[in-house]
Amino acid sequence: MAGQRSGQANGEGKENESRLTVLLAFGANLGIAVAKGFAALATGSASMAAETAHSVADTFNELLLLVGLRRSGRPADRRHPLGYGKERYIWTLLVAVAIFGMGALFSFYQGVQTFTGHPPDEESGTLVAFAVLGVAFALEAVSWQQALRQVRAAARAEDLPVIAHIRRTDEPTSVSVLLEDSAALIGVLIAAAALGLHRLTGSAAWDGAGSLLIGVLLTAVALILGRINLNLLTGSQADPRIVADVRARLGGAPEVEWVVDIITVTFGTDRVLACARLDFRDDLTAADIERACVRMAHELRDAHEEIDEVFLEPVPRDDPDLRERVIARYGRTLRQKDSGG
C-alpha cells in the first residue's frame, strides 16, 4: 500500500508539472501569435506569415494537450477497466497533425506563393518585425527552459540520457512542448535571417526560402511526435530494464521452474500491465500456486511503482502452441534465469 500511495503521489506531481509546462507554453504562444500577426501584416513577409501560423498552431496545440491531460486522468470504470491513460496519446497525436496541417502546410504555401507570385522587392516595417521576433524568442526561451527542465528531471529519474528518454517516454506531453518550443526558437532564427537577407539583397527569394525551411522544420517535428504517439497507442513494451527485472524476479521465485512467456504493455503514463505464463513446480497444490501468485504480484508492484496490474497464469512449459507463440514474438524461448530484454 505504501508503494501504491508513493506512486499516486509521484503521478500527481508529474501531472501538475506537465500542466504548468503546458499553461506556460500556452500563454507565451498566444502573445507571440498576436504579435507575429501584426508584424506579418506590417511587413507582408512570407516568413513572418509562416511564423504566425506556427505560433497559432502551437497555441491551439496547448489546448489539445490540456484536454488530453484532463481526460486521461479519469479513473477506471466498467467500460474502461484499465482507465483512460491512452487517451492522452490520442490528443498528443492530434497535436502532431495540427503542427503539420496548420503550420507546415501554410508555411509551404507561403513559400511557394513568394516564388510563383509577384512579391514586393522591399518590405516595410522590417525593424518592427525584428523587434517582435526578439520578444518572441525571449518568451519561447522561457517556455522552452521549463519544458527542458521537466524532461531532464524525468530522464534523470529513469537514469537515461535525454534522447533515450524521449524515445522511450510514456509521458509525451512535456516532450511535445519541448519539441514545439525548440522548433519555435529555430523558426524565429530562420525568419530573422530571411528578413535580414531580403532587406540586404532586395530579393524576396530569401523570404520564400525561409518560409519553406520553416515548413520543413514543422514537418520534421510533426513526424517525430507522430512516431512517439503511434508507438504508445499500438501498445509499446515497458522499459526493458523493468521487463528484465520482472523476468528475473519471477524466474527466481522458489515455486517457479520456468518462465514460459512474459508480456508488458504501457497503457498510460507510468502505468504498466505485466502478464506472465509460468511453469510451477509439480509438487505444489492449487492453494500453494494461488498464494505464490498473490505474493509475486505484490512484490512486482512494490518493486516498480509503474506496474499497475499483474496477471500470472500457470502453464506447462512444453505446450507446443505456447512455444510457437513465444518464439514468434522473441525469436527464442525464455529460460528461468534469462534476464534479456
Image (cartoon, grey):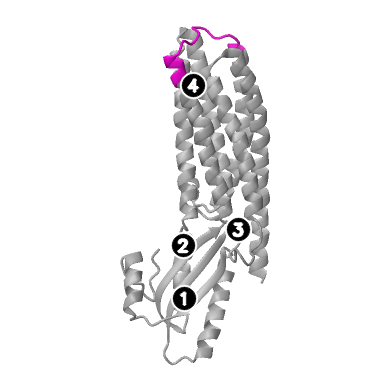
The amino acid beneath tag 1 is Leu
Q: Nearer the viewer, residue 244 or 225?
A: 225
CA distance for labels 1 and 3: 29 Å
Tag nearer the camera, 2 or 3: 3
Pinpoint residue 96: horizontal percent, then vertical percent.
51, 41
Q: Where residue 241 is drawn, which disc sits there?
A: 2
Determine whether the residue tagged by mark 4 lies in a helix, strand or loop: helix
Residue at the extreme front: 79
Determine whether the residue tagged by mark 1 lies in a helix, strand or loop: helix
Q: Nearer the viewer, residue 77 or 213?
A: 77
Reading the image, the residue beneath label 1 is 250
Quarter occupied by residue 41: top right
Q: Classify 231 as above or below 120.
A: below
Q: Is residue 90 visible?
A: yes
Reading the image, the residue beneath label 3 is 84
CA distance for labels 2 and 3: 25 Å
CA distance for labels 4 and 2: 47 Å
Bin the neighbour count of mark 1 within 10 Å (Cα to Cα): few under 14, some 14-19, many 20 and up. many
CA distance for labels 1 and 4: 59 Å
Quarter of the figure with the C terminus:
bottom left
**From which residue to which does the magenta span run?**
112-127
Determine whether the residue tagged by mark 2 lies in a helix, strand or loop: helix
Reading the image, the residue beneath label 4 is 110
